Image: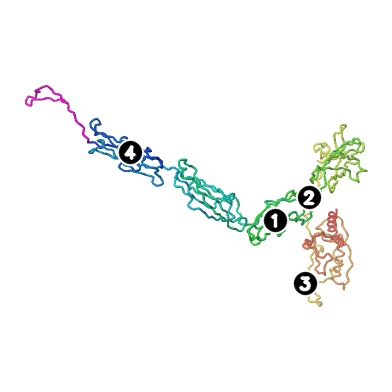
Amino acid sequence: MKTLAINRRTGRPVEPESEFIIKIHDINDNEPMFTKDVYNASIPEMSDVGTFVVQVTATDADDPTYGNSAKVVYSILQGQPYFSVESETGIIKTALLNMDRENREKYQVVIQAKDMGGQMGGLSGTTTVNITLTDVNDNPPRFPQSTYQFRAPESTPPDSPVGRIKANDADVDENAEIEYSITEGDGYDMFGITTDKDTQEGIITVKKALDFENKSLYILKVEATNTHVDPRFLYLGPFKDSATVRIQVEDVDEPPVFSRPAYIMEVKEDVPINSVIGTVTAQDPDAAKNPVKYSVDRHTDMDRVFNINSGNGSIFTSKPLDRETLLWHNITVIAAEINNPKQSSRVPVFIKVLDVNDNAPEFAMFYETFVCENAKAEQLIQTLSAVDKDDSYSGHQFSFSLAPEAASSSNFTLQDNRDNTAGIFTRKTRYNRHEMSTYFLPVVISDNEYPIQSSTETVTIRVCACDHRGKMLSCNAEALIHPTGLSTGALIAILLCIIILLVTVVLFAALRRQRKKEPLIISKEDIRDNIVSYNDEGGGEEDTQAFDIGTLRNPEAIDDNKLRRDIVPETLFMPRRTATARDNTDVRDFINQRLKENDTDPTAPPYDSLATYAYEGNGSVAESLSSLESVTTDGDQDYDYLSDWGPRFKKLADMYGAMDSDKDS
């Protein structure tokens, strides 16, 4: 520091500048300050004494080179006897053995830093250290009770839970993870146990279907074990525990149970109806042993081919079987308790229809071949093959031969090749298509199964003109085989025929139109077009003014020269003269006489007229002609009696007689 003396009056220095050195001595006026207000630390529980926890540091602003003002000494004010601190370094260590987190997890330690080396009069500062004990696996799992009781209905499906158990573990996180297992017991294979990772519970589940009637009580031994074991604490004992679990199975009403999961049956296709082909069996598994009834699910047997005895479960046929139509029948049988039909079960039944030789062999295709007019004898013209709908385990063996009626008189021969084929050969040289254009050759095909089946098939052989190489040129089927090979002359002839037919139709239509312009009826006196009504109410036998029937009795009063104009008869027949009826003739006899005459008169109506006979007789020999009664009869009717009804019914008798002959053929 520099100083200068100055005269106040003159303002001049009175002496040269002087330099002074001033040294300030430090005093203890600053307390120690920690680098943190709060320290946080953690150590594993059960640590050894002297285990390092954390180091705290405090600084003093005083001069460390002068005296002891900046010399700091550490001490523990709070946290004994669990922890200690080194006075020189501030290192905090554990001071107590076997500190257990489960008893106390967090500790708060207060550390003091004092200057002046800790002597009296020194300044001090404090800090807080929060110490947490971390968990180690030093606690085994323990069941809170030695026995657990659960109930499970026998209808409990597999993998369904039955109950939950839990072993307590004072540790946390992975040290508290537990694995459960069933170590022994009579239900070892019936139940399983898994661990719920969230709650660390053991979930007991069903592995197989329960059966109250078979076993109603299961006893299990369940063990709980820590998955992460610390070898340092094995001396504390085994880190596992066990408990007994009793599971009571409850009875429920169960449906009948079939003796098999599925049935396979075989039946021959020729068995008679109502033949038993097999039996299914089902029983009520409950202790009550309720009776069972059987039925066929008709959705699986829409045609009702099979039926079942509701009492004993025997399946029998109700319709004929045909293997060639359906080889397998897959039906479903239902078994239900009689007392409780809702309790039912189903089983599939597969029925195989076994083959019986009931089909005759037949041609593999329709054979229509040709033979040349210039063919030579013993010439092969066609090879035949056959098929059979029946099944043959050793293979089909067919034999071919000509039908007996054609074997000696046929113009062709047949040779069996013994390999399920046959050849047709010509028997003579040259054929004439003008003499015989088509031959029908009956061939008998037989199989070698039992019983032997045979059929007669027909081969159509057409005679055709061929060239010298045997290539067909033309035959009677030429129009079918070669539709584009018509000659020009044939086409012109067909066209002319069509034109002539059209002209004829046009002329016929014009002629009919001209005739239709003429009035239908010229005279009202034509009795065939008249309707005679007898609707006058007379006064009895004395009434002489009633209608005179004399005109009806004397047909000569009619003008016979007037012809019908509403039709054009193909041949004009002269009117027939009938004898005049006697005056005392009964009206019924008179009408019957007129009916007989009209029945035998080919020129008599009906044409377009209506003849009314207003006398109601006793009935007709034809009885009722209604078709309503005919539909009630199941059998075919005999229409031969129509021929006895007279000429009017001749056409009807011919038509129905022809239908009966067609059915007979």
Mark closer to the chain start, 2 or 1: 1
Q: CA distance from mark 4 to mark 1?
A: 88 Å
The disc placed on residue 509 is 2
Q: Which numbered disc flags the more N-terminal residue, 4 or 3?
A: 4
* Residue 389, percent from left and from top: 79, 46
| Residue located at (17% from left, 28% from top) | 22
Residue at the top extreme, as displayed:
16
The Cα atoms of the two marked residues, 2 and 1, are separated by 81 Å
**The label number, if any, that marks residue 536 in the structure image:** 3
- How many residues crowd around disc 2 within 10 Å: few (fewer than 14), some, or many (20 or more)? few
The answer to the question of whether label 2 and label 4 lie on touching residues, with beta carbons closer than 8 A, is no
Give the mark, 1 or 3, whose residue is nearer the N terminus.
1
Q: Is residue 612 left or right of residue 131?
A: right
Mark in front: 4 vs 3: 4
Label 1: which residue?
A: 281
Magenta part of the protein: which range? 1-28
Q: Is residue 174 visible?
A: no
Residue identifier under label 4: 85
Tell me which amino acid carries mark 4. Answer: Val
Label 1–label 3 contact, CB within 8 A:
no
Callout 4 environment at 10 Å: few (<14), some (14 to 19), or many (20+)?
A: many
Q: Is residue 16 magenta?
A: yes
Between the residue at mark 2 and the residue at mark 4, the CA separation in whole angstroms equals 141 Å
Is residue 28 visible in this depiction of the protein?
yes
